[in-house]
Image: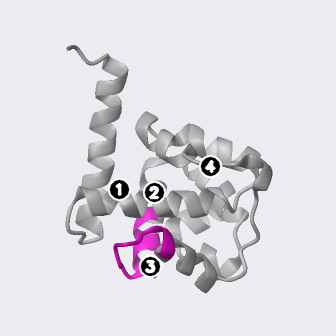
Protein backbone atom coordinates (compact mmCIF):
# COMPACT_ATOMS: atom_id res chain seq x y z
CA UNK A 1 0.00 0.00 0.00
CA UNK A 2 1.29 3.41 -0.95
CA UNK A 3 0.89 6.18 1.59
CA UNK A 4 -0.22 9.48 0.06
CA UNK A 5 2.53 12.12 0.24
CA UNK A 6 0.47 14.38 2.49
CA UNK A 7 0.10 11.62 5.09
CA UNK A 8 3.73 10.56 4.75
CA UNK A 9 4.82 14.15 5.39
CA UNK A 10 2.40 14.38 8.32
CA UNK A 11 3.84 11.20 9.83
CA UNK A 12 7.35 12.57 9.44
CA UNK A 13 6.37 15.84 11.15
CA UNK A 14 4.66 14.18 14.13
CA UNK A 15 7.68 11.92 14.58
CA UNK A 16 9.96 14.95 14.57
CA UNK A 17 7.77 16.82 17.06
CA UNK A 18 7.53 13.83 19.40
CA UNK A 19 11.26 13.14 19.23
CA UNK A 20 12.03 16.80 19.96
CA UNK A 21 9.61 16.81 22.90
CA UNK A 22 11.00 13.48 24.17
CA UNK A 23 14.57 14.74 24.02
CA UNK A 24 13.93 18.23 25.42
CA UNK A 25 11.66 16.93 28.17
CA UNK A 26 13.86 13.95 29.02
CA UNK A 27 10.83 11.70 28.51
CA UNK A 28 10.89 7.92 28.40
CA UNK A 29 9.64 7.58 24.83
CA UNK A 30 7.44 9.03 22.10
CA UNK A 31 4.32 7.54 23.71
CA UNK A 32 4.94 9.66 26.79
CA UNK A 33 5.64 12.66 24.54
CA UNK A 34 2.33 12.10 22.71
CA UNK A 35 0.39 11.93 25.98
CA UNK A 36 2.01 15.16 27.13
CA UNK A 37 1.49 16.95 23.82
CA UNK A 38 -2.19 15.96 23.70
CA UNK A 39 -2.94 17.02 27.28
CA UNK A 40 -1.22 20.42 26.98
CA UNK A 41 -2.69 21.17 23.56
CA UNK A 42 -6.19 20.42 24.83
CA UNK A 43 -5.74 22.56 27.94
CA UNK A 44 -4.39 25.44 25.88
CA UNK A 45 -7.05 25.15 23.15
CA UNK A 46 -9.87 25.17 25.69
CA UNK A 47 -8.59 28.43 27.19
CA UNK A 48 -8.62 30.29 23.86
CA UNK A 49 -11.49 31.93 22.04
CA UNK A 50 -12.73 29.70 19.20
CA UNK A 51 -11.30 32.12 16.63
CA UNK A 52 -7.86 32.07 18.24
CA UNK A 53 -8.00 28.29 18.70
CA UNK A 54 -8.65 27.95 14.97
CA UNK A 55 -5.77 30.28 14.13
CA UNK A 56 -3.38 28.26 16.29
CA UNK A 57 -4.71 25.02 14.80
CA UNK A 58 -3.91 26.27 11.31
CA UNK A 59 -0.25 26.52 12.38
CA UNK A 60 0.00 22.87 13.38
CA UNK A 61 1.13 19.97 11.20
CA UNK A 62 -1.64 17.73 9.86
CA UNK A 63 -1.55 14.97 12.49
CA UNK A 64 -0.81 17.34 15.38
CA UNK A 65 -3.82 19.36 14.20
CA UNK A 66 -6.00 16.25 14.42
CA UNK A 67 -4.83 15.64 17.99
CA UNK A 68 -5.44 19.30 18.83
CA UNK A 69 -9.05 19.26 17.60
CA UNK A 70 -9.88 15.85 19.09
CA UNK A 71 -12.93 16.22 21.35
CA UNK A 72 -13.11 20.02 20.97
CA UNK A 73 -16.40 21.72 21.72
CA UNK A 74 -16.02 25.33 20.58
CA UNK A 75 -19.34 26.35 22.12
CA UNK A 76 -17.83 25.62 25.56
CA UNK A 77 -14.76 27.78 25.09
CA UNK A 78 -12.99 29.70 26.30
CA UNK A 79 -12.94 28.16 29.74
CA UNK A 80 -11.82 30.56 32.43
CA UNK A 81 -8.37 29.81 33.77
CA UNK A 82 -8.59 30.10 37.51
CA UNK A 83 -4.86 30.00 38.16
CA UNK A 84 -1.59 28.61 36.89
CA UNK A 85 -1.88 25.82 39.43
CA UNK A 86 -5.38 24.91 38.23
CA UNK A 87 -4.08 24.85 34.64
CA UNK A 88 -1.18 22.59 35.65
CA UNK A 89 -3.47 20.34 37.70
CA UNK A 90 -5.78 19.92 34.69
CA UNK A 91 -2.80 18.98 32.51
CA UNK A 92 -1.68 16.44 35.11
CA UNK A 93 -5.14 14.84 35.22
CA UNK A 94 -5.24 14.53 31.43
CA UNK A 95 -1.80 12.88 31.38
CA UNK A 96 -2.97 9.99 33.60
CA UNK A 97 -1.66 7.41 34.21
CA UNK A 98 1.65 9.13 33.48
CA UNK A 99 2.94 11.36 36.25
CA UNK A 100 5.28 14.03 34.92
CA UNK A 101 6.12 17.29 36.69
CA UNK A 102 3.38 19.39 35.08
CA UNK A 103 5.10 22.79 35.06
CA UNK A 104 8.20 21.50 33.27
CA UNK A 105 6.00 19.47 30.92
CA UNK A 106 3.90 22.50 29.98
CA UNK A 107 7.02 24.61 29.48
CA UNK A 108 8.41 21.93 27.13
CA UNK A 109 5.25 21.85 25.00
CA UNK A 110 5.03 25.65 24.91
CA UNK A 111 8.69 25.78 23.81
CA UNK A 112 7.91 23.24 21.07
CA UNK A 113 5.00 25.36 19.83
CA UNK A 114 7.08 28.53 19.98
CA UNK A 115 9.82 26.83 17.98
CA UNK A 116 7.56 25.53 15.20
CA UNK A 117 4.73 28.06 14.91
CA UNK A 118 4.64 31.64 13.66
CA UNK A 119 5.90 33.97 16.42
CA UNK A 120 3.09 36.46 15.81
CA UNK A 121 0.47 33.74 16.20
CA UNK A 122 2.10 32.49 19.38
CA UNK A 123 2.06 36.09 20.61
CA UNK A 124 -1.69 36.23 19.96
CA UNK A 125 -2.16 33.00 21.93
CA UNK A 126 -0.07 34.30 24.82
CA UNK A 127 -2.10 37.55 24.88
CA UNK A 128 -5.22 35.53 25.77
CA UNK A 129 -3.67 33.91 28.83
CA UNK A 130 -3.36 35.17 32.40
CA UNK A 131 0.03 36.55 33.44
CA UNK A 132 1.03 33.52 35.53
CA UNK A 133 0.42 31.16 32.59
CA UNK A 134 2.16 33.51 30.15
CA UNK A 135 5.30 32.98 32.24
CA UNK A 136 5.37 29.32 31.18
CA UNK A 137 6.22 30.36 27.59
CA UNK A 138 9.83 30.98 26.52
CA UNK A 139 10.93 34.58 27.01
CA UNK A 140 11.46 35.11 23.27
CA UNK A 141 7.84 34.09 22.60
CA UNK A 142 6.50 36.38 25.33
CA UNK A 143 8.49 39.39 24.14
CA UNK A 144 8.15 38.93 20.36
CA UNK A 145 5.45 41.56 19.85
CA UNK A 146 7.26 44.13 21.98
CA UNK A 147 10.38 43.65 19.85
CA UNK A 148 8.50 44.20 16.56
Please identify the quarter of the rendering in which residue 46 is found.
Answer: bottom right
> Which comes sooner in the sequence, label 2 or label 3?
2
Residue depicted at x 64% and y 48%: 72
When the figure is inspected, residue 136 is found, relative to residue 22, above or below; the finding is below
Query: Which residue sits at x=25%, y=56%?
Result: 30
Colour pattern: one colour
C-alpha span from label 2 to label 4: 19 Å
Q: Quick one: label 4 or label 1, which is nearer the N terminus?
A: 1
Counting residues from the N terminus, which is met first, the one under dot 2 or under dot 4? 2
- C-beta proximity under 8 Å, tags 4 and 1: no
Q: Which residue is mark 1?
A: 34
**Residue tagged 2:** 38
Q: Residue at x 70, y 48 (%)?
A: 73
> Does dot 1 land on a helix, a strand or a loop?
helix
Tell me whether the residue at label 2 lies in contact with that at label 4, contact meaning CB atoms closer than 8 angstroms.
no
Element class at badge 3: helix
Q: Earlier in the sequence, mark 4 or mark 3?
A: 3
SS at mark 4 in the image? helix
Which secondary structure lies at badge 2? helix
C-alpha gap between disc 1 and disc 2? 6 Å
Amino acid sequence: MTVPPTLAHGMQQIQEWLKELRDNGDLADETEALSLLRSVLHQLRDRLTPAEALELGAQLPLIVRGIYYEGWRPSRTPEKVRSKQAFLDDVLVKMQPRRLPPEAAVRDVFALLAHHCDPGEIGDVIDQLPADIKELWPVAARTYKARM
